[in-house]
Amino acid sequence: MKSRAVAECVFVAILNAFASEVIPASQEQFVRLSLQECRIRALQNNLSFRVQRLQPLVSEARLKAALAPFDPAITASFSGSRTQQPNSLVFDPSTGTYISQSVPAQNSLGTRLGISKAFSFGTNASINLNNSWSKGSGSSNYGSNISLSVSQPLLRGFGRDANEAGIRIARANRETSMKQIVADASAAVQKVESAYWDLVSARENLRVAQMSHQYAQQLLERSRARAETGAQALRDVIQAEAGVATAYQGIISAEARVRDAEDTLRRLTNIAAMEDGWSFGIIPTDTTHIDSGTPSFDSLFAAALENNPAVFQAAQAVETSKFTLKYRYNGLLPTLDASTEIVLRDGDRTAAKSMDDLPTAAYPSWTLGLRFSVPLGNRQSEASYREAIVAVRTAELELQDARQAVQADVRSALRRVETSRQQIAAAEETKRLRESTLENEQERLRLGLSTNYDVLQVERDVADARRAYVEARVEHERALLALDVATGLLLRKRDIGVEMDGSELTSR
């Protein structure tokens, strides 16, 4: 038994010697990062978010495309012709025979310059200036006129609802796209803050593990010194050495957790793209804090309804579906179109005066017309209209669901903040009592009333209490973060703004 105890002592001593070879922090390169620096890096350098920031540009292009049908159009044309007729037979009374007579060629030229435009009420208008020249057997003839044509749908195709539906939908989609950028920015900040606090928690846990290892090392040194004087048995030394080895295992696990948390933060902030970005450690400079109080649920819920991207997008979907419904209803109406054309002509056929009469409207003419048509059945339009009704109802229900989801999220987040605040107080009291218990157990050990095993057990309880206190404080930060996300105030509280062109993010 004695030889076995000696072997165990030697084995644990080897583990302890290995544990003492922990690389000092001074031998590793570190970069210190604040929470705000991580937010800025996440928004400016994160590759995934940079891709998402391009989407509003697509929505802006689609809005311009929806406006295109209302752009004015200028038209110009030129035409020329020459017609050569075959010779004609003409009766000659003096000879009583038919003779062949050539027919002069007919030459003509024409030009037209005009402008046309469609308007939001369905009106289409165009004005044209026409000039012509022709010459045959006689003198040249010149002609000019100005024509104004207007057509207006009176039923189907009438009004802004029928003609601006695409524009309104494109504008709503652009606003939704901008809100989506805000949501994406909020998600990016949420991820990087969560990763930051994970690293804070990991490094604090590493510090607790190092404290436990240091305490176990001190206990081992005291036990060896007492064992040399015969005041303590070899069994107690072995227990102390086992405590050192166990504490070192805690350091190994804590170190791995720190490295994992650092890698996550590197990826979210794109530090990995820097030279040697994977080689140096990250030291978070911000520490946890305890929020003294939070606003009432009613004010938080009101802020969430105003700022939460999910509610905004659901509300925009309702508006878009209503635009579509109005457009589809217009498609059920019969066609009744009115049209008119006014033409001002010039009476002089000479080149010098071919346009003199146009300003005086000396030779006006006009036409009016109505065209009516009604489809029999119109089943396609009816099906589209019924589909639009269902879409409106669906969007309204989804908006109600989004509001209820936000209400539940705010309630849950607020409750989480209050719970975490209470957990901090409880964890702090537990830590204080555990540390007091350890002091008492150390005194009992000094008096010979306790063993190293008992002291190490109590010290593990102290380490657990310290870790629980660290986690409670970090959980409070996560709870505050979740509350800002639920209310949609995450970016505003951090002074992060999104430029309205969708291509830039700024931190004020």
Image (spheres, rainbow, N blue to C red):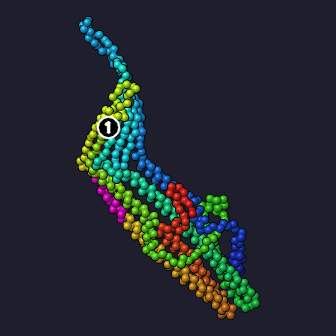
Disc 1 is placed on an element classified as: strand
Can the viewer see residue 464? no
From the viewer's perspective, tell me whether residue 369 is left or right of residue 59.
left
State whether residue 181 is above or below residue 302.
above
For the residue pair 458 and 291, the one nearer the viewer reads as 291
Q: Position of residue 154 (x, y in %)?
A: 29, 48
Where is residue 221 shown, x and y percent of the image?
Answer: 72, 84
Look at label 1 and name its amino acid.
Ile
Write the start and end of the magenta stretch as one range. Answer: 382-397
Q: Residue at x 23, y 47 (%)?
A: 376
Instruction: Give the x, y percent position of residue 414.
Output: 47, 75
Any magenta on residue 396? yes
Q: Main secondary structure of the magenta part?
A: helix
Residue pushed farthest right? 229
Q: Quadrant of the N terminus?
A: bottom right
Which residue position is annotated with label 1? Answer: 342
Q: Residue at x 62, y 75 (%)?
A: 204
Q: Residue 473 or 497: which is nearer the viewer?
A: 497
Is residue 359 shown above or below 152? Answer: above
Residue 16 falls in image quadrant:
bottom right
Q: Quadrant of residue 343?
A: top left
Residue 133 appears left or right of 483: left
x, y percent for residue 394: 35, 62
Horizontal side of residue 31 vs 389, given as left or right = right
Q: Residues within 10 Å of mark 1 (few under 14, many from 20)?
A: some
Residue 385 is inside the magenta segment: yes
